[in-house]
Amino acid sequence: MRLIYLLLGFLALGLALLGVVLPLLPTTPFLLLAIACFSRSSKRFETWLYHTKLYQTYVADFRETGSIPRKRKKRILVSIYILMGISIFFAPIIWVKIALVGLTIFITYYLFKVIPDRPEDPDSK
């Protein structure tokens, strides 16, 4: 089982890396999956991934503080609106379009009302 988790961890990590350059693939969920798989298979790879710049950029803030800076939330939302807009435009069935609009509204609500804002770091400006 450890080997399967290890292979799944590397597959998820590879998809996360693709997600950095391809806007259609979500980076953060694949990084979280990679961490979960590595935690069950290899503490060495889990520790390594925790210390990578990729992990620090996409996951560390939220995992440690449970909050996201408002500026980052806005960037996330722009990406979601673009991708959902494309999906809604090309969806062939009206019920799928309605469901995607509902999902977009839910994501917007969740991002801005449920996940707390973290004050911007004065050193990052």
Image (tube, rainbow, N blue to C red):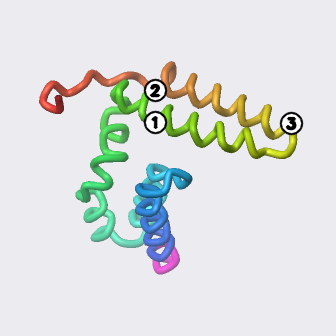
- Where residue 122 sits, quadrant-wise, is top left
What is the x, y in percent for residue 2?
46, 76
**Which secondary structure lies at badge 2?**
loop
What's drawn in magenta, residue-wise?
1-5
Q: Can you say which quadrant of the picture contains the C terminus?
A: top left
Q: Residues within 10 Å of mark 1 (few under 14, many from 20)?
A: few
Percent position (x, y) of residue 107?
59, 31
Residue at 78% across, 36% down:
97
Q: What residue sits right under mark 1 in the picture?
A: 76
Q: Which residue is mark 2?
A: 115
Residue corresponding to mark 3: 94
- 3D distance between C-alphas at marks 1 and 3: 26 Å
- Residue shown at 39%/63% (left/top)? 39
- 67 lies above or below 92: above
Residues under labels 3 and 2: Cα distance? 30 Å
Q: Is residue 17 magenta?
A: no
The answer to which image quadrant residue 110 occupies is top right
Label 2 crowding class (10 Å Cα cut-off): few <14, some 14-19, many 20+?
Answer: some
Q: Is residue 10 above or below residue 99?
A: below
Mark 1 secondary-structure assignment = helix
Q: Where in the figure is residue 109, as x and y percent of width and height?
A: 57, 22
Tag 2: residue type? Ile
Residue at (40%, 59%) from the top-left corner? 35
**What separation in Å lies between label 2 and label 1 (alpha carbons)?**
13 Å
* Disc with the residue nearer the chain's start (1 vs 3): 1
Point out residue 114 in the picture as x, y percentages from the top left corner.
50, 23
Q: Sequence-wise, which precedes: disc 2 or disc 1? A: 1
